[in-house]
Image (cartoon, rainbow, N blue to C red):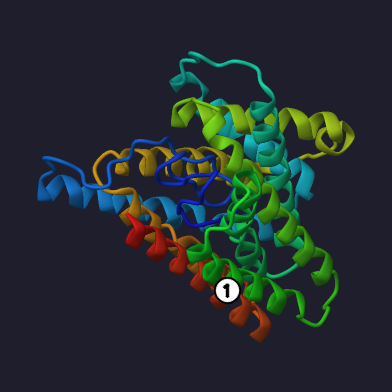
Amino acid sequence: MPVSAQPAGGHGRMRDSGQTMPSGVPAMPSGAPETPRGETGRGQSWSIALALLAPVLWSTSGLFVKILPIAPVPLAALRALIAGVTLAPFWRPRGLTLSWPLAVMLASYTLSVLCYVSAVRLTTAANAIALVSTAPAWVAALTWIAERRVRWLLVPPVALVLAGVAIVLAEPAAGRSVEGNLLGLGGGLAFGLFIFFLPRVRQPVVGRVVLCNLFAAAALFLASPGAILAVRPGLWDWVALAYLGAIQIGLATVCFAAALTRISAAQASVLTLLEPLLSPLWVYLAIGEKPSAYGFAGGAFILGGILVDLLVRRWRG
C-alpha cells in the first residue's frame, strides 16, 4: 500500500514517529539522522542503493496481487503470515505492553492491507496505489483534530491530495471499479490512522513488522476461516506468496531500515515516491493494464501533494 515516507504531525513521519512505508509496510523507527555523520561516499552510495531497492520491491505487490488466482482475504492473510514468520526470528520483544494505541495500530494496519489488496483486484493498480497514498492527508487531518489547530502551511498539499481523490472518484464506472476506488480510499484512511498511532507504540522496526503482519494474518483468519482453509495454491502460487511475504515486505523492510542508518529521512522519503510510480508500470508491462486519464490526473495531483508536503516540512526544518 502504499505511500511515500513523509512526516505528518501526529504521525510525525520524520521527527515524531520516523519513517513510514508504502504498500502496507509498518513505519520505520524515529531517530533517523537528518544529517548523517562520518559517512563515507561509498557507504552512503550503498545506503542510497538500499533505499532505492526497497520501493522497487514494494512496487511489485500490485502486479502479484493482480495475477495470483487467490481471493483478497486469503491472499492478504497468507502474505502477512509469511512476512511475520520470516522476520520473527530476528525480533526480541522488549518493552511491549498491551494498550489501546497498540490495538488501534494493529487493527488499522490489517484493514489497510485488506482494502489495498481488494482495491487492486477491483480497479486499476494506478488508482489503488494513488488512493492508498492519500494517508499523509488523513494524518494531517487527524493531527489538526488532536491539536485543535490547523497548520496552514500543510493546507495546500492536503488540498492537492483531496483534489486528486476527487478526480479519481469521478472516473466513469467500469465493472466494479467504483467499489475498488472506494476501497482504495478506505485503505488510505486506515493507513493514515495506523500512521497516526504509530508513535504511541515503541518497538524496533522488525518488531513492528512482525506484530502487524502476524496480527493481520490471525485477524483475517478469524474473520474468514473457511475462505482461507479452502485455498489450494499451486507450486508457483506458493512461490509468489513467498516472494510477497519474505522479499516484497521482509527484505524491503530490512533494506530501508539499513538505509536510514546512513542517509537522512528526507532523502529516503523522496526515494519512496518511486513506489506509486513503478507499481502501475509493472502491471502495464506484464498484463497491459493502462491507467485511465482520470487515474493519471488524479495520481499526479496526489503525488504532487505528497511532494509539496515533503518540501514544506523540509523547509520548516
Q: Is residue 175 above or below residue 263?
A: below
Q: Where is residue 148 in the image (x, y as percent from the top left)?
A: 63, 49
Q: Position of residue 156 (x, y in %)?
A: 53, 71
Quarter occupied by residue 245: top right
Residue 89 lies left or right of residue 62; in this view the side is: left
Q: Residue furthest bottom?
A: 293
Q: Where is residue 177 in the image (x, y as percent from the top left)?
A: 80, 71
Q: Residue furthest right?
A: 226
Is residue 117 or residue 182 the one in the foreground?
A: 182
Quarter occupied by residue 269: bottom left
Residue 69 lies left or right of residue 80; in this view the side is: right
Residue 292 lies left or right of residue 70; in this view the side is: left
Q: Is residue 271 visible?
A: no
Is residue 142 or residue 224 the one in the foreground?
A: 142
Mark 1, residue position: 160
Q: Is residue 179 visible?
A: yes
Is residue 199 or residue 42 the one in the foreground?
A: 199
Q: In this view, does 252 lie above or below 298?
A: above
Quarter occupied by residue 124: bottom right
Q: Which residue is drawn at 68% across and 46% down?
A: 113
Is residue 88 or residue 108 the one in the foreground?
A: 108
Q: Position of residue 87 (x, y in %)?
A: 49, 28
Q: Residue at x 31, y 56 (%)?
A: 267
Q: Identify which amino acid the numbered label 1 is placed on.
A: Leu
Q: Which residue is drawn at 28% across and 49% down?
A: 264
| Number of numbered markers | 1
> Where's the C terminus, which quadrant?
bottom left
Q: In this view, does 108 lie above or below 283?
A: above
